[in-house]
C-alpha cells in the first residue's frame, strides 16, 4: 500500500494551494459483483467501501484522493477443467481523481459524478485501476454538514497482456455514501414591510434566525447592557470608523454573532445622522484562495452586511454594497487572517458635502447589482 499512500499524499499537497472551500470527507459502503467475462461466473457477490478526501478547486469541480478495498466471494468452478477454481477475490485500491457537481460545488446536496485512476493490489500483484461513480447527496439535518445518499459505480482492474488469463476485472457497485459536505450558504434576507418593526437577524445553516447572543441589544442611549462592551462607532471625514472589524466566518459571508452588536451600532449611527444620504459598504476577503473566488466572497459579505443593516431599520436606498476581493488587505499576510475578512463604510453623499467624493484606488465590483463608488 505504499504506492497508494504516496499517491494520496501527493494529491493533497497538489490541491492545497488552489482550494476555495472546506475540505470534504466521503465514506462509501456497498455491494459489488463482477460483470462480464469469466469473473462474473467464477466470483460471487461481495462488497467493500472507500474513504475519500475532496478539496474544491472551482464552482463545480473538486480534486480528491481515495483509499478503499473490495472482497468478492468464490463462485462457480471454471468451465475449463485445467483451470483451478478461484478462491475469494480481494483488492486494495488507492486512486486520485475529480468530482463534478452540476449544481455547483457550494450547493448543499444534489447530484455528483466522479472519475478516478490509480493502483489496485490484488494478491501479490499491483495493477492499474480506474473507477467512476454517480450519486445524489441529501442533507441529513439543519445546522450540520452531514450528507447521505445513494450511489452506483464501476471499477475496472487491468490485467497484464502476458497473464495466463489477461481479461480485465469489471466490478459493478451500488451502495450508500455518507459525507461531510459543503457548509450551507446563507439565503437572502427579506426586507421588513413598510411600517413593520424589523427583527435583528443573522445568517445560519438553516437560513435566517433571530439573534440570540450574550449581549443582544443596546439600551435607549445606545449602550450595551451591563457587563457587555459598547463598540465605538463614529464618523471621521468620509468614513464611518469602527473600534473593531465586523468579523465573518472563514470562507463564508456569515457574520459572526460577536459582531451583531457592532452592526446594530452602525445602523443606529446611520439612523441618527439624516445628513448621510448614501453609504458604500465595501467588502473585503483575506489572502487565501483565488482572485475570482475572493472577489465573489467579498461581494457577498458586503451584501450580507447591507441586509443586516436594513433589518435593523436602515433605509435600503441609502446603502450600496461593493466588493474588493483581496486587493485591500488590512494585514499583509498570505494566511487566512480574520482581520482581513471585513467590511468598511464610506459616506458617498451627504447634505454637508460639496462636490463628488474622491475616486477609490481601484474599481470595485458591485454586489447583487447595486451601484459601486463613483
Image (spheres, rainbow, N blue to C red):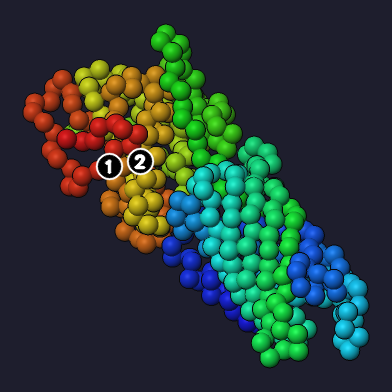
Instruction: Identify which residue, 107 or 227, lies in the foreground.
Output: 107
Question: Which element carries disc 1, helix, strand or loop?
Answer: strand
Which residue, given by chain and number where applicable, does mark 2 sit on? Answer: 299
Q: Position of residue 11 (x, y in %)?
A: 53, 71
At horizontal 66% and vertical 78% (from top left) the residue drawn is 158
From mark 1 to mark 2, how far is it between C-alphas? 7 Å
Work out whether residue 95 can be spotted: no
Q: Quadrant of the N terminus?
A: bottom right
Numbered badge on residue 365: 1
Q: In this view, does 82 lie to the left or right of 20?
A: right
Mark nearer the N terminus (1 vs 2) = 2
Q: Position of residue 115 (x, y in %)?
A: 58, 63
The answer to whether mark 1 and mark 2 are in CB contact below 8 A is yes
At horizontal 73% and vertical 74% (from top left) the residue drawn is 169
> Label 2: how many residues lie within 10 Å, few (<14), some (14-19) or many (20+)?
many
23 is higher (above) or lower (below) than 83: above
Q: Is residue 103 left or right of residue 72?
A: left
Q: Position of residue 90 (x, y in %)?
A: 80, 75
At horizontal 91% and vertical 85% (from top left) the residue drawn is 81
271 is higher (above) or lower (below) than 128: above
Instruction: Identify which residue, 4 or 85, lies in the foreground.
Output: 85
Q: Position of residue 12 (x, y in %)?
A: 54, 69
Question: Which element carries disc 2, helix, strand or loop?
Answer: helix
> Label 1: how many residues lie within 10 Å, few (<14), some (14-19) or many (20+)?
many
Quadrant of the rendered image containing residue 79: bottom right
Q: In this view, does 275 lie to the left or right of 316?
A: left
Q: In which quarter of the image is the C terminus?
A: top left
Residue at the far front: name it. Answer: 80
368 is higher (above) or lower (below) than 165: above
Instruction: Identify which residue, 198 or 36, lies in the foreground.
Output: 36
Amino acid at each position: 500500500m505504499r504506492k497508494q499512500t504516496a499517491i494520496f499524499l501527493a494529491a493533497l499537497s497538489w490541491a492545497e494551494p488552489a482550494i476555495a472551500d472546506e475540505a470534504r470527507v466521503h465514506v462509501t459502503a456497498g455491494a459489488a459483483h463482477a460483470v462480464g467475462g469469466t469473473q462474473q461466473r467464477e466470483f460471487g457477490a461481495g462488497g467493500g467501501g472507500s474513504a475519500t478526501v475532496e478539496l474544491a478547486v472551482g464552482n463545480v469541480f473538486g480534486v480528491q484522493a481515495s483509499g478503499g478495498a473490495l472482497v468478492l466471494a468464490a463462485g462457480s468452478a471454471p468451465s475449463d477443467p485445467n483451470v483451478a477454481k478461484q478462491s475469494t477475490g480481494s483488492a486494495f485500491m488507492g486512486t486520485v481523481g475529480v468530482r463534478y457537481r452540476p449544481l455547483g460545488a457550494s450547493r448543499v446536496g444534489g447530484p455528483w459524478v466522479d472519475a478516478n485512476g490509480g493502483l489496485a493490489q490484488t494478491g501479490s500483484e499491483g495493477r492499474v485501476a480506474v473507477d467512476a461513480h454517480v450519486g445524489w447527496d441529501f442533507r441529513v439535518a439543519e445546522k450540520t454538514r452531514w450528507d447521505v445518499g445513494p450511489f452506483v459505480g464501476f471499477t475496472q482492474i487491468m490485467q497484464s497482456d502476458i497473464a495466463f488469463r489477461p481479461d480485465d476485472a469489471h466490478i459493478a457497485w451500488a451502495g450508500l455514501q455518507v459525507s461531510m459536505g459543503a457548509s450551507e450558504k446563507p439565503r437572502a434576507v427579506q426586507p421588513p414591510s413598510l411600517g413593520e418593526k424589523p427583527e435583528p437577524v443573522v445568517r445560519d445553516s438553516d437560513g435566517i434566525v433571530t439573534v440570540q447572543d450574550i449581549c443582544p441589544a443596546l439600551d435607549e442611549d445606545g449602550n450595551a447592557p451591563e457587563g457587555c462592551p459598547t463598540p465605538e462607532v463614529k464618523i471621521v471625514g468620509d468614513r464611518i470608523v469602527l473600534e473593531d472589524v465586523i468579523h465573518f466566518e472563514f470562507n463564508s459571508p456569515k457574520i459572526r454573532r460577536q459582531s451583531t452588536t457592532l452592526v446594530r451600532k452602525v445602523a443606529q449611527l446611520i439612523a441618527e445622522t439624516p445628513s448621510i444620504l448614501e453609504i458604500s459598504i465595501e467588502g473585503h476577503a483575506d489572502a487565501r484562495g483565488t482572485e475570482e473566488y475572493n472577489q465573489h466572497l467579498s461581494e457577498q459579505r458586503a451584501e450580507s452586511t447591507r441586509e443586516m443593516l436594513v433589518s435593523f431599520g436602515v433605509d435600503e436606498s441609502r446603502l450600496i454594497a461593493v466588493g474588493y476581493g483581496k486587493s485591500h488587505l488590512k494585514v499583509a499576510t498570505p494566511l487566512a487572517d480574520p482581520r482581513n475578512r471585513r467590511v468598511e463604510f464610506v459616506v458617498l453623499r451627504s447634505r454637508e458635502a460639496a462636490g463628488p467624493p474622491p475616486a477609490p484606488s481601484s474599481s470595485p465590483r458591485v454586489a447583487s447589482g447595486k451601484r459601486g463608488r463613483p
